[in-house]
Amino acid sequence: MTMPTLDDGHDITVGRGEAARVIAYRSRSGRAPTIVWLGGYRSDMRGTKAEHCLRIASDLDQSFLRLDYSGHGESGGAFEAGTISRWTEEAGEVIAAMGAKSVILVGSSMGAWIALRLVAAARRGDLPFSVAGLLLLAPAPDFTEKLMRPRLSPADWEAIETNGRLEEPSDYSTDPNIYTRALFEDGKASQVMTGLIETGCPTAIIQGMADPDVPYTHALELMDCLPQTNVTMTLVRDGDHRLSRPQDLALIERILRNLVADIAQ
């Protein structure tokens, strides 16, 4: 695989007044559609899978884009102000600023939720680009309602109501995970798994069956919401939530390459 070449880093300001935040992104020019990396909760655009997708795009000479949501990585803004709607807005604004007209969205964990929200907005004509394909990795759409709400105790909810936030230990960082009341309220209003999700494009899902954060049954439930055609799921028997082992990255590469080839036909 050839060595990737990135454009210089860029940033744009999203929102106005007190809601303004500077969003950092990186891109490479190439063929359409643009492969767009949408990371997960508390991840950043320099993660293992993001770097691997860049290398794939470079090898295929596809244009590529990745960004940090507000409160993540190189972007400004307070993490605790973040919501699904806010982060979706930022992703849409960055894609538009890059000038991409057609994209393949690669959404990891929470990034899959944002990808599905972007598909809906694009199909409504609210965005200046179309979505040509989706690759969803350990997808966690509606995680606040479907995965978190059922397991939270009364004490957890009291903390959220009293303090506006809940802190939990993280398996991936020394800093705790922070879940705000605003995140839960917006998450409830931003659900996508409430009926048929019309994507209008080929969709591939990769899900680990040993994922401790997003059970594979959640991916199966998502499959029930997707069209009956042009949707595939690959279950990795011993795969965890990160899907970052060499064999996982090889699988992501194979499926992403196939998706690009199918769209080009």
Image (spheres, grey):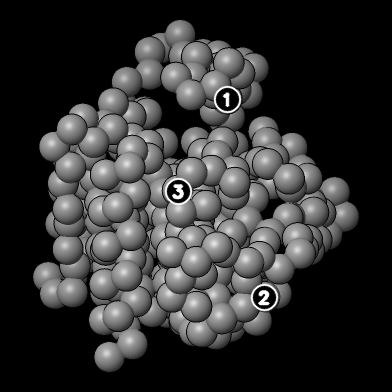
Q: CA distance from mark 2 to mark 1?
A: 31 Å
Chain-order first, disc 2 or disc 1: 2
Reading the image, the residue beneath label 2 is 98
Q: Is residue 133 above or below residue 26?
A: below
Which residue is more in the foreground, 133 or 124?
Answer: 133
Chain-order first, disc 1 or disc 3: 3
Reading the image, the residue beneath label 1 is 178
Marks 2 and 3 in Cβ contact (< 8 Å): no
Which of the image's four quarters has the C terminus? bottom left
Q: Does 99 sit left or right of 260 as displayed?
A: right
Give the x, y percent position of residue 108: 41, 49
Q: Is residue 59 above or below residue 193?
A: below
Which residue is more in the foreground, 219 or 265?
Answer: 265
Q: CA distance from mark 2 to mark 3?
A: 21 Å
Residue 18 appears in the figure: yes
Identify which amino acid the numbered label 3 is placed on: Lys
